[in-house]
Image: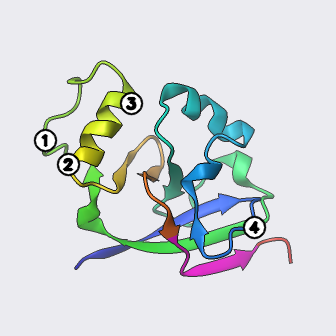
Amino acid sequence: MDKIKLYHYSNVDFKDKIKISFFGANTYTRHSRNLSIIKRSHFYLDRDKKEYFFNGVKFLYITEINKNKLYNLNTDDLKCNGNFNNVTDFYKFLKDKGYYGIIGNNSYNVAILFKDIKITDKINLLV
């Protein structure tokens, strides 16, 4: 299976997994939380291209996931774009289809996961 690496920046000291239950706890995810009640975690597909507000965070987490478990918004094979009244309905639809999350581009190549995911590497950025 085709795996891709995902990168998650956080001040939370996760042990084994990135947990979606922490979603919305930080100021930079509160706006996203208000868009949908679906708990999720956010990742970058490129380690070196992240939003400025993650400069100075304590940890970089790296994980891998099978690419076919992520719905690709760039190709939008199911023609979802514009077919949902809100983000929550869209996320529920994808979860019901068996997707663990989404990949796409919002000026950065990003992924959103709807499930906790095992950490494969943890880097302390403040050492």
Could you say which is closer to the camera, residue 95 or residue 26?
95
The reply to whether residue 119 is visible in this rendering is yes
Could you say which is closer to the camera, residue 83 or residue 37?
37
Callout 4, which amino acid?
A: Asp
- Cβ atoms under marks 4 and 1 closer than 8 Å: no
**Where is residue 73, by image quadrant?**
top left
- Structural distance between the alpha carbons of marks 4 and 2: 32 Å
Q: Earlier in the sequence, mark 2 or mark 1?
A: 1
Q: Which residue is mark 2?
A: 97
Q: Earlier in the sequence, mark 4 or mark 2?
A: 4
Indicate left or right for 52 with 6 as reference: right
In percent of width and height, residue 112 lies at 44, 50
- Structural distance between the alpha carbons of marks 3 and 4: 28 Å
Q: Which residue is mark 3?
A: 88
From the image, which quarter does the C terminus lie in?
bottom right
Magenta range: 118-124
- Structural distance between the alpha carbons of marks 4 and 1: 37 Å
In percent of width and height, residue 7 lies at 54, 65
**Where is residue 29, by image quadrant?**
top right
Q: Give the SS element for disc 4.
A: loop
